Image (cartoon, rainbow, N blue to C red):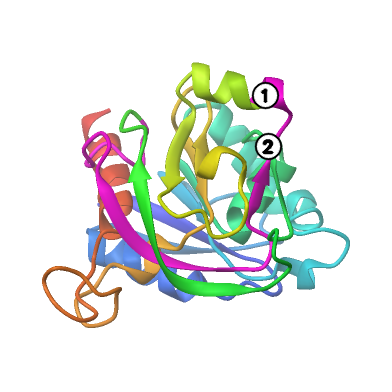
Amino acid sequence: MTRIGVITFPGTLDDVDAARAVRLAGAEPVSLWHKDADIHGVDAVVVPGGFSYGDYLRCGAIARFAPVMDEVIAAAGRGMPVLGICNGFQILTEAHLLPGALIRNNHQKFICREQRLRVESTTTAWTNLFEDDEEIVVPLKNGEGNFIASPAELDRLEGEGLVVFRYLDNPNGSARDIAGVRNARGNVVGLMPHPEHAVEPGFGPDSAAGARQGVDGLRLFQSAISALVGA
């Protein structure tokens, strides 16, 4: 069975939810601790959301130097799928596994809502089961989800197809409505909304199937399994 590691830092909130999403997708979740010096032979890693190290200094800036991240960076370089969600996305940008940075929302307020996204790239380890331009809904909850990069870097991301998710109604001022990006290889993806909160009927966003029936997030985790099985 595919084994997907889920990292817990001091202040992580969504590690249990991410592990449950991994299990529902059909893989075995493996708990990884921020002080671990190895990743215990997992096939992929999820860096979940929360407030690692209390978000002191800058979101993700301290977590980036946790011992386990050295192993994650090395494994990502070898092609291992890595997904960063919210604070995990911030950590991956701090670790330079992904481009850009995340700053305070342009309205300076924490936001929590169901968020519509458009899938812009289906050639990644985490989105291969989606359709191009498909619209999905997953929960969003953050105070520092405003994606920024230099104009030249934004042009590069657009030109090289590295934007993975785009907001349909930009909630935080993110440049060019960008909600998630990938690396050039497509094995590392980060996004601010929370797919792990849209994986089980009865607990997700509202959908055409009914109240709380949205499970669009589950396919990110199933995509990783598909990519690993087909590798």
Image quarter of residue 107: bottom right
Quick check: can you spot residue 42? no
Quick check: can you spot residue 74? yes
Q: Position of residue 77 (x, y in %)?
A: 57, 27
Which residue corresponds to the image point at 81% horizontal and 57% vertical from the top-left? 62
- Give how far apart the Cα atoms at labels 1 and 2 are: 8 Å
Image quarter of residue 104: bottom right
The front one of 82 and 160 is: 160
Mark 2 neighbour class, 10 Å CA radius: few under 14, some 14 to 19, many 20 or more = some
Q: Secondary structure under badge 1? A: helix
Q: Are marks 1 and 2 in contact (CB under 8 Å)?
A: yes
Asked if the magenta segment contains residue 123, the reply would be: no
Residue found at the far right of this picture: 57
Which residue corresponds to the image point at 49% horizontal and 41% vertical from the top-left? 189
Query: Residue flagged by tag 2: what amino acid is it?
Result: Gly
Task: Decide: is 102 above or below 200.
Answer: above
* Magenta part of the chain: 124-153
Q: Position of residue 92 (x, y in %)?
A: 64, 45
Q: Is residue 156 left or right of residue 66?
A: left
Query: Residue flagged by tag 1: what amino acid is it?
Result: Glu
Of callouts 1 and 2, the N-terminal one:
2
Q: Which quadrant does the C terminus fall into?
A: top left
Q: Is residue 113 left or right of residue 26?
A: right
Q: Is residue 109 left or right of residue 170?
A: right
The front one of 68 and 215 is: 215
Q: Which numbered marker is on residue 100?
A: 2
Q: Position of residue 66 (x, y in %)?
A: 75, 55
Task: Decide: is 163 above or below 89.
Answer: above
The front one of 42 and 200 is: 200
Asked if the magenta segment contains residue 131, the reply would be: yes
Which residue corresponds to the image point at 28% horizontal and 35% vertical from the top-left? 227
Residue located beneath label 1 in the image: 153
